[in-house]
Image (cartoon, rainbow, N blue to C red):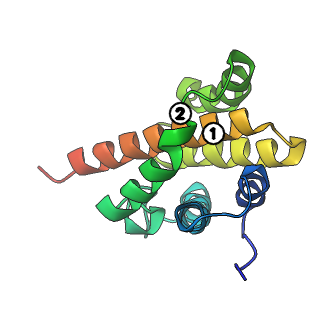
Amino acid sequence: MPRPPRHPLTAAVRRALARPLDRSAESYLRLLDRRLASLARVAAGDAGGTATGGAAGLTGAERTVARRFLSPREGRWQDGDENLVRGYLDRWERGADHGAAAPARALLECASALAAIGAPPGALWFFLWEMESILAGLAEADNEEGPC
């Protein structure tokens, strides 16, 4: 029996999936929970861990798990789903805070809101797709930051 999800979004995604869940879906749900927990630490100002490190699930193998899960769902959303998600995610881009905490907070706020309102599967898939892009962008930014 799978362990209960730590984040309400993971539970919402689980409910949106066809039964029975395959191994790929179960792997992704565990990854999603780890990523959301990592984002919560970053949003709270945890300087010891970044949203882009291994704890956020961005190793090559973990990105493969995410791509395997999201690929068949790509494009299974409509404009309303995109507008709902972008309404939350676009806020941090307009803010003054350009560190990792701002996008982490935006991702978490959107994830919590989607779970709370019972968002349709299309909105969930679009959010997860956008989260991949944002996390990848943060990872690239981290790789470019350094003492030199």
- Residue 8, placed above or below residue 80: below
Image point (81%, 38%), residue name: 119
Is the Cβ of the residue at disc 2 closer than 8 Å to that at disc 1?
yes
Q: Which residue is mark 1?
A: 125
Percent x, y for residue 58? 38, 58
Of 50 and 28, nearer the camera is 28
Q: In the orientation shown, which residue stands out farthest toward the front?
A: 20
Residue 43, above or below 137: below
Query: Which of the marked residues, 2 or 1, is nearer the chain's N terminus?
Result: 2
- Residue with the most extreme left position: 148
Q: Nearer the viewer, residue 102 or 72?
A: 72
Residue ID for mark 2: 74
Is residue 15 among the parts visible in the rendering?
Answer: yes
Disc 1 residue type (three-letter): Trp
Residue 99 at least partly seen: no
Would you say 41 lies left or right of 20 here?
left
The CA distance from mark 2 to mark 1 is: 7 Å
Q: Residues within 10 Å of mark 1 (few under 14, many from 20)?
A: many
Residue occupying the point 44% across, 58% down: 65
> In the picture provided, is 44 more to the left or to the right than 81?
left
Q: In the displayed orientation, state which residue is furthest to the top.
A: 79
Q: How many marks?
A: 2
